[in-house]
């Protein structure tokens, strides 16, 4: 019980820290320089610039009904971290607005967009990594997925595009380009922080030399290989399909190795968000230290 409690407490602390970091970037970079943002936070900026409504107030007003919908559809327990993340974010937005602080970036909007996206991504990444959210747009997307059959990522993208278009009511098109740069940096930093800098590639290999290839991968790269049963739809021939998880550094070596053994091999490479296995270590240098 104490172990579970400590884990929950850690989540609350880090969600709160992430919300504070995002709020800092939101107030001192997004708001201060009129850089458009995506999601519900971006919508609060639209209301702020068009109607003078403080984002900390509109943030609560917009998110409150979304939280109620989310609790009804997905359960109250699943919404605890969401409520905490949103409540923390807009509290910190209000607090930072009371503290006079100015970062002089010489009105260089490229630098502003890079810094805004980086700070926002760092804060959001922490919140997402520990189970929270900083806005109700994901609730809207989940409702659209459940009720309309629209894929979650498509619904989120559609909502973000709508918010960006609404942002053109108070910013110019050139400034929108900087906002898109900030949005791109934001998404990259979120992914990096959410995954803890974790980067793994998956590889599927179809070859006439599966045993030789698997042996070389295991011996030279120190990676485990799994055989999957495959059958050609046209030829009807059964083949062993090799599956292996690799670090990005290993991927190039694996491709060269396979080409040497079987130039006609079919190789498919894809990104993996996470591997959960006590036997897998992303860094090969760490792996080699362990097996010595």
Image (cartoon, rainbow, N blue to C red):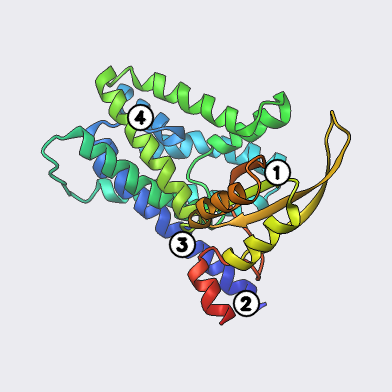
* Cα distance in 3D space between marks 2 and 3: 17 Å
Q: What mark, if any, has residue 180 been given in the picture?
A: 4
The residue identified by callout 1 is: 74
* Cα distance in 3D space between marks 1 and 4: 32 Å
Please say whether residue 36 is visible from this viewpoint.
no
For residue 186, above or below residue 52: below
Crowd class of label 3 (few under 14; some 14 to 19; many from 20; radius 10 Å): many
The residue identified by callout 2 is: 3
**Marks 3 and 4, the one that precedes in the sequence:** 3
Crowd class of label 2 (few under 14; some 14 to 19; many from 20; radius 10 Å): few
For residue 123, above or below residue 231: below
* Cα distance in 3D space between marks 3 and 4: 27 Å
Q: What mark, if any, has residue 14 been given in the picture?
A: 3
Q: Do the residues bearing badges 1 and 4 touch, measured as CB atoms within 8 Å?
A: no
In the structure shown, which secondary structural element does the residue marked by tag 2 occupy? helix
Residue 214: percent from left, percent from top: 70, 59
Residue 22: percent from left, percent from top: 37, 48
Query: Which numbered disc, 2 or 1, marks the residue closer to the eye?
Result: 2
């Amino acid at each position: 019980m104490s172990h579970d409690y400590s884990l929950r407490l850690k989540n609350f602390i880090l969600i709160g820290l992430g919300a504070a970091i995002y709020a800092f970037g939101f107030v001192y970079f997004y708001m201060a320089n009129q850089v458009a943002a995506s999601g519900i936070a971006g919508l609060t900026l639209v209301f702020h610039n068009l109607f003078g409504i403080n984002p900390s107030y509109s943030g609560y007003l917009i998110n409150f009904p979304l939280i109620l919908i989310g609790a009804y559809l997905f359960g109250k327990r699943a919404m605890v971290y969401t409520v905490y993340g949103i409540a923390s974010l807009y509290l910190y937005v209000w607090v930072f607005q009371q503290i006079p602080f100015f970062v002089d970036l010489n009105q260089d909007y490229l630098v502003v967009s890079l810094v805004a996206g980086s700070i926002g991504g760092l804060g959001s990444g922490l919140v997402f990594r520990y189970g929270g959210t900083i806005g109700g747009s994901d609730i809207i997307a989940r409702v659209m997925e459940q009720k309309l059959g629209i894929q979650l990522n498509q619904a989120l993208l559609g909502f973000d595009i709508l918010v960006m278009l609404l942002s053109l009511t108070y910013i110019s098109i050139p400034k929108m380009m900087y906002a898109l740069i900030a949005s791109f940096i934001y998404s990259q930093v979120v992914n990096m922080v959410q995954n803890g800098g974790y980067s793994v590639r998956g590889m599927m290999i179809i070859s006439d030399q599966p045993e030789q290839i698997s042996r070389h991968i295991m011996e030279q790269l120190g990676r485990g290989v799994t055989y999957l049963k495959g059958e050609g739809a046209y030829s009807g021939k059964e083949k062993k399909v090799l599956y292996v998880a690799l670090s990005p550094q290993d991927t190039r070596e694996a491709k060269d190795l396979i080409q040497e053994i079987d130039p006609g091999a079919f190789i498919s490479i894809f990104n993996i968000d996470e591997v959960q296995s006590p036997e897998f270590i992303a860094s090969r240098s760490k792996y080699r230290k362990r097996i010595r």
